[in-house]
Each structure stands twice: as C-alpha cells, then as structure tokens.
Image (cartoon, rainbow, N blue to C red):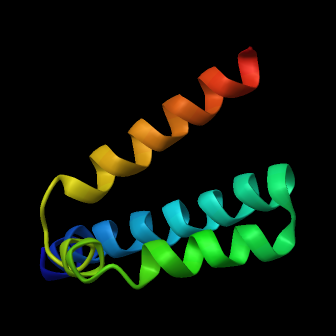
Amino acid sequence: MVALAIVALALPALMFALLVGLLCWSAGRRYGLAAGVWAAASLTLMPRVFGHAHIGATDMPLTLFWFAAALSFHAAL
C-alpha cells in the first residue's frame, strides 16, 4: 500500500518530465534543436509549473494531455 502511494505522488513529476521531453521533441522537430532545448528549458524554469509538477494534483496530467491533444490536432492538419 505504501509503494502505491509513493508511485501516485511521483506520477505528476514523471508526467512533467514527459511533457518537457514532448515539448523539446516537437519544437525541435519544427524549429530546430536550439529552439526545442530553449522551449524545454523555459517550461522547466517556470517556478509555478515546476512547483505544481511536484505535488499530487491534477495540473500535470491535464497539461500533458492538453498538449498531446493539441500536438495531435496539429499533426493531423
């Protein structure tokens, strides 16, 4: 039971890491590697986003899936 609680608390941080990687990949693919790295660094260095990534809230799953949906919509155009 304790292991499940630890995984549940670490899940938003893992989703934040996935969001940063997805942003770096998508921006890097479209605008170049430097733009992808700067976009990922900009997202990572936002204090509120970084803080919300480390608490057990619904902010990171929502942000990740909204970004994935927008990216999928853009790819389908």
User: How many numbered marks have been drawn onto this rendered protein structure?
Assistant: 0
Image location of residue 55, percent across then percent down: 14, 75
Quadrant location, the C terminus: top right
Q: Is 24 above or below relative to 13?
A: above
Q: Which residue is depicted at the point 82% across and 49% down?
A: 30
Image location of residue 5, percent across then percent down: 15, 74
Nearest the eye: 63 or 33: 33
Q: Left or right: 69 with respect to 22?
A: left
Image location of residue 17, percent across then percent down: 49, 73
Nearest the eye: 27 or 12: 27
Q: Which residue is depicted at the point 63% across and 58% down?
A: 22
Q: Residue furthest top?
A: 77
Q: Which residue is depicted at the point 50% across and 61% down?
A: 19
User: Which of the 4 quarters of the picture holds residue 20?
Assistant: bottom right
Nearest the eye: 68 or 15: 68
Quadrant location, the N terminus: bottom left
User: Which of the 4 quarters of the picture holds residue 75?
Assistant: top right
Q: Which residue is depicted at the point 73% across and 17% down?
A: 76
Q: Is 6 above or below relative to 62?
A: below
Image location of residue 64, percent across then percent down: 42, 50
User: Which of the 4 quarters of the picture holds residue 62?
Assistant: top left
Q: Left or right: 1 with respect to 18?
A: left
Q: Left or right: 35 with respect to 11?
A: right
Q: Left or right: 64 with respect to 71?
A: left
